[in-house]
Image: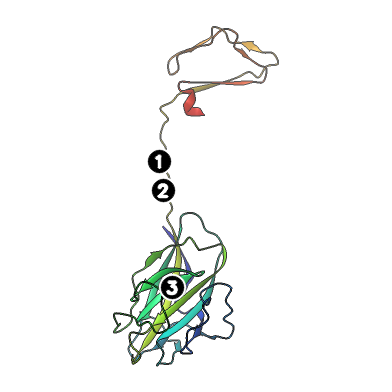
Amino acid sequence: VTERPLVAVDSVWRYDQSGSEPAADWRQPEFSDIGWRQGSGAFFVEESDLPAPKSTPLTLGRITYYFRTTVVVEEKSAATQLALRLLVDDGAVVFLNGTEVLRMNLPEGPLEYTTFASPSVGNAVFSDRKVVPSESLRVGTNVLAVEVHQSSLGSSDVVFGLEASLIEEIRPALPLRESPESWVELHNPGTRAVELSGWRLEEGIDFTFPANTPLEAGGYLVVARDAASLR
């Protein structure tokens, strides 16, 4: 398995902590977040230690905080998968190019700015690495959008950080094996055709050439025990 880092926990994000829900298309790549603030992770209001640098302070009194960042993928294959680790207090949903790929500590169904997370988180720690659906991942620029929800309006802390990587499983090469099939290639380097009628091969391949079997000048002819296996 190979792993390529895509987003570090201290990467730069645009964020909105205005205390109201943004436009409905805020998760989409085409949305303009130029008016949002900018900061690097981890985002926090937290007195306890975190397993990541406390980089950008947030303001309490909001139920939901919104984050966006862009990532560039230079290449991908059918085996490429997206892996995420979240550092969140209390709940979050992650979107990739507008498609939800991960939800933590939040109910199923549509979410609003006023939706509370459950259960609440004491001290934020990194989640286990989650391999998420990557069908919407594309070569070129991608947008990760995250909404972080508090468990109550009076919560005394909030934390957001994210790590993303691309993983790809490389299948091991098969060991060299001898083929159970046998074949012989004949070549006529001469300038005249050679008639092979009555010629016979024995041992690995037992074959007698029928009448009217010419091998043309410069031509090739393959004789196999199982001709279908060579096609």
- Measured in 3D between alpha carbons, the distance from the residue under mark 1 to the one under mark 2, in whole angstroms, is 9 Å
Instruction: Determine which residue is flagged by label 3.
Output: 94
205 or 131: nearer the viewer = 131
Query: Residue 23: image x %, image y %?
Result: 53, 81
Q: Secondary structure at mark 2?
A: loop
Query: Residue 59: image x %, image y %?
Result: 43, 92
Q: Secondary structure at mark 1?
A: loop
Q: Nearer the viewer, mark 2 or mark 3?
A: 3
Instruction: Determine which residue is flagged by label 2.
Output: 172
Instruction: Determine which residue is flagged by label 1.
Output: 175
Give me the residue at 40% from left, 27% from top: 180
The reply to whether callout 2 and callout 3 are in contact (CB within 8 Å) is no
Give me the residue at 51% from left, 55% from top: 77
| Label 2 neighbour load within 10 Å: few <14, some 14-19, many 20+ | few
Colouring convention used in this rendered image of the protein: rainbow
The reply to whether callout 1 and callout 2 are in contact (CB within 8 Å) is no
Sequence-first tag of 2 and 3? 3
166 or 111: nearer the viewer = 111
Give me the residue at 39% from left, 75% from top: 86
Q: Secondary structure at mark 3?
A: strand
Tell me the amino acid under the disc marked 2: Pro
- Measured in 3D between alpha carbons, the distance from the residue under mark 2 to the one under mark 3, in whole angstroms, is 33 Å
Query: Residue 196: image x %, image y %?
Result: 58, 10
